[in-house]
Image (spheres, rainbow, N blue to C red):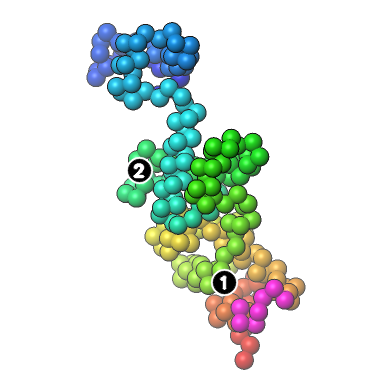
Amino acid sequence: MSSKFFVPLEPPWPESAQGQLIDVDAMRQAYKKGSLDAGVVDALNQVGFVWDLRQYKWEQQLFALQTYFNIYGHTKVPYRFIVPQDDERWPTSVVGIHLGNIVHKWRQQADVLPPEKKLQLDTLNFVWKASSCVVLPWSRKILALKTYRAIHGDTKVPKGFIIAQNDSNWPEHLWGIRLGGIVDKLRRSLRKNSKNLTQEQIDDLAQLGFVYNFDNSITPQK
């Protein structure tokens, strides 16, 4: 419900309430000051009224992170991750939460978050440094490339390509990976003859017909 809500002039709303303004903010302020009638407080409590909106949002966001942790075993939430609909593993109360963006903000606010909130996050092994979230094992990068090639027929991954959430064409543990950025770094390493890649890794890419400058591909070394 918005902070100010006009009761619609139609059923199923009671006729006596239709057209009335419900000022939610005013009720919360009156409650904090202790000036709200006890009967009103009891009635609102019975329908689960939220008195502290900030605390409620925090609890919902933390619940979403806990659920993510239960599903994936970590809190390295991709920046673009949004709690999906039609996934029975997720409670309906957190569907639609932009969890990736929220987690990003928590990292940025690490120095000013209240100690009790930081402690709650730490109990979930919260990853405070974003750099810790982007390290992927080589096997996962290769699997992502293989899957991309199976879907698109080549390895010409656009620089901005991100593996979509809830895309059944992709293994779930690859969802949210910024494959375009990974491939861009691989291309630059190959063009510069960088020692960041082993010969075995170069051969893995060659087996996939990896394209490193869109005019050339690499071939396995025999």
Q: Is residue 187 left or right of residue 169?
A: right
Q: Is residue 216 above or below residue 23?
A: below
Q: Residue at x 57, y 71 (%)?
A: 138
Of residue 218 and residue 215, the one placed in the foreground of this image is 218
Q: Secondary structure at mark 1?
A: helix
Magenta stretch in the rendered image: 195-201
Q: Residue 79, how many percent across, how many down?
A: 55, 49
Q: Secondary structure at mark 2?
A: loop
Q: Is residue 134 left or right of residue 13?
A: right
Q: Residue at x 47, y 69 (%)?
A: 147
Q: Which residue is mark 1?
A: 138
Q: Residue 152, how many percent across, how many down?
A: 49, 67
| The C terminus sits in image quarter | bottom right
Whether residue 109 appears in this view of the structure is yes
Q: Quadrant of residue 197?
A: bottom right
Q: Are marks 1 and 2 in contact (CB under 8 Å)?
A: no
Of residue 172 and residue 167, the one placed in the foreground of this image is 172
Whether residue 81 appears in this view of the structure is no
Q: Which residue is mark 2?
A: 91
Of residue 107 and residue 2, the one placed in the foreground of this image is 107
Residue type (three-letter) at the residue carrying disc 1: Trp
Is 199 a magenta residue? Answer: yes
Mark 2 neighbour density, 10 Å: few (under 14) some (14–19) many (20 or more): some
Q: Residue 11, how many percent across, how many down?
A: 24, 18
| The N terminus sits in image quarter | top left
Q: Residue lying at the far right in this picture: please name it.
A: 192
Q: Quadrant of residue 196?
A: bottom right
Q: Is residue 131 above or below residue 104?
A: below
